[in-house]
Every structure is written in structure tokens, then in C-alpha cells.
Amino acid sequence: MTLKSIRRAYQVIKITLHYGLDELIPSKMTPWYFKLLRNCLFWIRNQHKNKVGGERLKLAMQELGPVYIKFGQMLSTRRDLLSDEWAEELAMLQDRVPPFDSAIAREMIEAELGATIDTYFEDFDDTPLASASISQVHTATLKSNGKAVVLKVLRPDVEDQVHADIQLMSQTASFLETLLGHGNRLRPAEVIEDYRTTIEGELNLKLEALNAIRLRNNFLDSGSLYIPYMYEELCFTRLIVMERIDGIPVSDMAALKAQGTNLKKLAERGVELFFTQVFRDNFFHADMHPGNIFVSREHPDDPYYIGLDCGIMGTLTDEDKRYLAENFLAFFNRDYRRIAQLYIESGWVSPDTDIGAFEQAVKVVCEPMFNKPLDEISFGHVLLELFRTARRFDMVVQPQLVLLEKTLLYIEGLGRQLYPQLDLWQTAKPFLEDWMSEQVGPKGMAKKIKQEMPYWIDKLPELPELVYDNLKMGKNFVKSQNQMLARYLTQQQRSHKSNYLLLTSAVLVICGTLLFNQGATLWASYTCITSGTILWLLGWRSRPKNRKF
Ligand SMILES: Nc1ncnc2c1ncn2[C@@H]1O[C@H](COP(=O)(O)OP(=O)(O)OP(=O)(O)O)[C@@H](O)[C@H]1O
């Protein structure tokens, strides 16, 4: 541990205690050494006693800085772990932070470009357009084509800060795990590991640019989503350059209404976009907070979305997609047994889960949802409740599914905010049904055969040899099984014989000794002991030599 990290640890402890976060751990779970340590730091008092737990945690994270703010934002999406009040409190964390000096930004940009800013850009604006926890955004004009662009550059030293803070968080999580017990529902170590993967991905802007290029190509002529063009030759780990977009922030309802945006279409498009990304492309934007989504100013009666910040993207395996789609369909058919089976078949919960109890638990949470009309049921909410239930049955966390659930909840919330009468079921159902029929119907079968045909054509010439080898192997297998059985029987016989001889020898030796002690005729006792010894030798010799057969 360096001096810097010790100082940081003290700062974290101080802020934690100022907000009385230690008091949130139930007293009976707090070990004596923890209480002792707390008393040693007696001068740091809880200064926010009048505030509730969730708010204290939010304020502490705000004060701890960007890494913790982002962590709080991520945690707010883990509604399978936190109660709704805590999650809502953390969702309010804002990561707009003061900008860093533009001279440093210039230095960093030039170091990445390997040239001066003037080589590529004119009108570089020293006042940042936006300044967030990980990066800062500046505007400029590209000399080569005169187009308006933005330069997104990482904050200085952000990598070191992130790594140091994450290390400290991991250590605290391991300590908490010991304190709360490894089977605890909160699973701190797992949550931090999940966060580490996310934030480390965000530190690589080149990766963000590559994600944006892929998403842009998927929706190039869609008329529903636009992703700004990335100038790939000017994209590096710490700097990316992209087309500057001009849209209305999706949360600005007044501006959307003022330009006469067709809100119904916009809301439906959001849900359609999500299902297309997941089920058609298997590549979805998983960081859809309001600062990253804009709406076009062009043709407001047929609006489209503009998406920024492709740092966090989600993908699902074909199996995950199938289980997910089947989960939704089983839910709408109220087939709770099927849901329980699907969780087991997919490996999300252990195969020895009590399926009856699991089915019952699923029913308890799902049934009340049908008190609402079908069109009001939220897919995100269904998934959230199912995950919460499955966690009680030790579901192994599937980070890709957590990302999906969080995005779905957000998209549905956004859709409802734009157009409260949005019929989620009617919008999403065609996607699920089409996808399912493509996967499991005759169409799916044909697709699979088409996909696997080249493999089988390649393997066909080997077929006769394979059949011959397998038949031969089968014959040899039966022969070796018979030999094994015969060996086993012989061993059993030998073992019985040996046990019988050893037992008889023991009886004879005991009898001989007793006769000798009682002063009976000597020859009788000698005969017993001698024959006992001979039988013991015979029994010992006839023991099965090798227990393997
Ligand atoms: N291509 C662009 N055109 C116009 N404005 C942009 C562009 N890219 C980013 N911005 C502005 O900069 C802000 C921050 O950008 P971005 O979300 O990519 O940064 P970030 O550091 O990843 O922030 P966070 O992780 O908090 O979302 C956006 O909300 C938007 O206002």
C-alpha cells in the first residue's frame, strides 16, 4: 500500500463515518474488532443523523467522487439487490463534475494525435461542451472536410484513480463478505467485480468508438436510430473524434412538444429499437440514461433517436435469447412451471433446485401483475421480479441479463413518459413471436439445417470410417464389459473365501488359547492354534490382490 492509497483509504473511511454508513450494518452482525476500530475513530461523528439510509449513501458517494458516483448509478440499477427506495435515491446521482483545465485537455489530445491540434482541427473551443466523470467533450471543426466534430478526451489520471478506488472497494467488499457471511444476498464481492468490468471498459475510448461504428452500421437506413459518424483514424484509447450532432435531449418534454414531435411514434420506436437490438442484432446499447439519448429536429412527425456514448454494450448468447423469449411467453401464458423449468434448463439456477417451491415463488410474484390490463404490464418489471425470486434460489448473477433488465426498465419508463398510453405488449409481442417462430418453428429448423449444411458436407467423406470405428469400438466395449464382470465375480469369490478362512482361523486361535489357559490337554490346544495359524495363512494368501477390476 502506498502513502497515497493510505491517505485515500482514510478519506473514504472519514466520509463513510461522517454519513454514518457504519450504522447501517445491523449491530448483531458487527464483530467486536469493528466496534473497537469505530470507537478509536471517536472524533469522526455521524453528522447526518436526521437523514434516511439511502440518502446518506447517495450523499457519501457524491462526496467520494466520480468512481463512487458511477458505482452508485450502477447500483441503482441492481433492483434485484436493493429496495426500491434505495435504488431511487441512488438513481439521482449526477455525474456532472467541474471541467478540468483546457490546457491539460489540449496536451492530452496532442499526445494522442501525435500532432498539434491545428494539424487536424480549426475553431477548437477551450470551453468544454460537457464535463463528466470519465471524460470531457470539446467542439471543433475538422480541417479536411469542414464538418463540425466533437473531441471526447479522458480526464487526466482517471485510470490511476479508478484502479486505486476499485482496489480499495474490492478489499472492502471482501471484508464485508466475511462480515455478512458468503451466502449473503448482497454479494458485495460479485457486485464490485461486475462494476470493475464495466468501468474498465469505459476507460478505453477506442472500444467505445468501435461499438459506435457497429451500432451505426446496424441502423444505417433504419430511420429510427442515428449514431454519429466516428473518425476512426482519429480515435485512440484516450481520445475519440466524432460527428457533432444537434438534437433535443429526450428528457426535454417541453422542447419535444414545442416542435410537434409525434410522441406516440417516438415511444413505440424506443421499444421496437430495444427488441431489434436484442433479438435481431444481439448487440444492444446498455447505457441509455437521458444524457445519452437525443431526438431528431428533422421531420418531427416521423422522429428518430440519436444515441451517444456506446461505452457499455450488451450481447446475449442464442441460448440466453431463447430462454428469455420463452420466459416472457410463459409468463403471459401464466405457465409458472415452465418458467421454473427454464431457469433450471438454462443453468441460471442449480439443477437441484426444488422446482415445486420455485414454481410457487414465481407464481406468488407474477400472479398479482395480472391485476393490471395486459398492455400495462412492463417486461422489465416482469424480468426484475423473476430475477429477485430466482436470487432467493441462489441464481448465479448473469451480468448480461442484468444489463438487459436495466435497459428494458429504462426504455419502458422512457416510453411511458413520452406517451403514457403506450401499449407495451402490442409493441413487443410481434418481435418475440417472430423470433420464436424463426428459432423453433419450421423456419428455424430450415435455418439451422442451412447453417450446418457446409459442416456436414465437409464431414460426409469421413462417415463410413467413423461408422466402422464406432461399430468396432462398440464390439470391443461389450467384450471389455464382459471381461470386467468376470473379473469382478472372481474377486468377489476370492474375497468371500478369504473372509471365511480368516474368521475360522480367529475362532480356532481363540479356542486354542482358552483351552491352554484352562489347563486342558496340550495337544488339543496346540492343534487348534496350529490349524488356526495355517487357515490364517491360507486366508491371507487368498485375499483379492487388486481391488480394481
Ligand atoms: N457527438 C456529440 N455531439 C454533440 N454533443 C455531444 C456528442 N457527444 C457527446 N456530447 C455531449 O457531451 C455529453 C457527455 O458525453 P458522453 O455521455 O459521451 O460522456 P461520458 O463521459 O461518457 O458521460 P457519461 O458516462 O456520464 O454518460 C453528452 O451528454 C452530450 O451533451
Image (cartoon, rainbow, N blue to C red):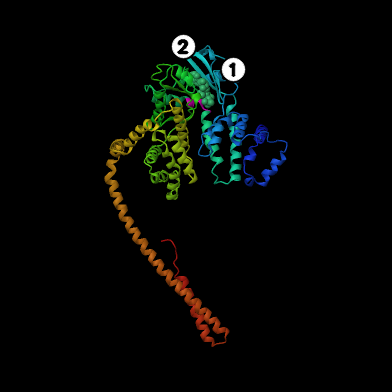
- When the figure is inspected, residue 13 is found, relative to residue 291, above or below; the finding is below
Q: Which secondary structure lies at badge 2?
A: loop
The residue closer to the viewer here, 449 or 455, is: 449
Q: Position of residue 392 (x, y in %)?
A: 49, 45
Query: Does the magenta segment cover residue 225?
Result: no
Residue located 35% across and 59% down the image? 481
- Which image quadrant for residue 372? top left
Q: Position of residue 2 (x, y in %)?
A: 66, 34
Residue located 29% across and 43% down the image? 462
Q: Residues within 10 Å of mark 2 (few under 14, many from 20)?
A: few
Q: N-terminal of the two: label 2 or label 1?
A: 1
Q: Position of residue 317 (x, y in %)?
A: 41, 37
- Which image quadrant for residue 304? top left
Dot 1 amino acid type: Ser
Q: Which residue is mark 1?
A: 102
Ligand 1 lies under 8 Å from the Cβ of mark 1:
no
Residue located 49% across and 77% down the image? 505
Magenta-colored span: 203-208
Q: Which residue is mark 2?
A: 146
